Amino acid sequence: MMAATRPEVLGLYRKIFRLARRWKSSLGLEEETKKEKQYIVEEARKLFHKNKNVTHPDTIRQCIEEAHARIDIGLHYGIPYPRPVSISV
């Protein structure tokens, strides 16, 4: 990982965990909030661990942009899960 992107990636990782701590389910149910918080933490760990050996700058930038997009979509719609993508064949 490039030295300039390391602080950005670590900051993004911390931002996701802070978001998980503050997360409230859109349904307002405590059990659902707990499940969604757990999902956010597990998904972040899984994806960051999966991409920890990525070294190509364009791929790193793409991963960072994807993480920001998922955060923005999650906050906007109030759901932590990725939105399904429709594929037309």
Image (tube, rainbow, N blue to C red):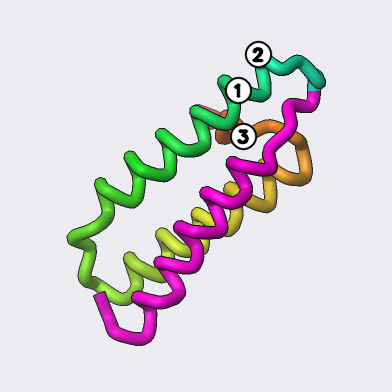
Q: Where is residue 13 in the image (x, y as percent from the top left)?
A: 45, 58
Residue 54 lies, with reference to residue 75, above or below; the image says below
Q: Where is residue 38 in the image (x, y as percent from the top left)?
A: 50, 28
Q: Residue at x 52, y 36 (%)?
A: 40
**Which disc number belongs to residue 44?**
none
Residue 81 found in image quarter: top right
Residue type at mark 1 is Lys
Of residues 24 and 61, the one drawn nearer to the viewer in this rendering: 24
Residue receiving disc 3: 80
Residue receiving disc 2: 31
First in sequence: mark 1 or mark 3?
A: 1
First in sequence: mark 3 or mark 2?
A: 2
Residues at marks 3 and 2, CA–CA distance in whole angstroms: 15 Å
Q: What stretch is highlighted in magenta?
A: 1-26
Q: Which residue is drawn at 76% across and 37% down?
A: 77
Residue type at mark 2 is Glu
From the viewer's perspective, tell me whether residue 78 is left or right of residue 36.
Answer: right
Q: Nearer the viewer, mark 3 or mark 2?
A: 2
Can residue 48 be found in the magenta stretch?
no
**Which disc number belongs to residue 34?**
1
Residue 27 found in image quarter: top right
Do callouts 2 and 1 mark residues in contact (Cβ within 8 Å)?
yes
Q: Which residue is drawn at 25% across and 74% down?
A: 1
Residue 79 lies, with reference to residue 28, above or below; the image says below
Q: Which residue is drawn at 24% across and 58% down?
A: 52
From the viewer's perspective, tell me whether residue 60 is left or right of residue 16.
Answer: left
Q: Where is residue 79 in the image (x, y as percent from the top left)?
A: 68, 32
Q: How crowded is mark 1: few (under 14 residues within 10 Å), some or many (20 or more)?
A: some
Q: Which of marks 1 and 3 is in front?
A: 1
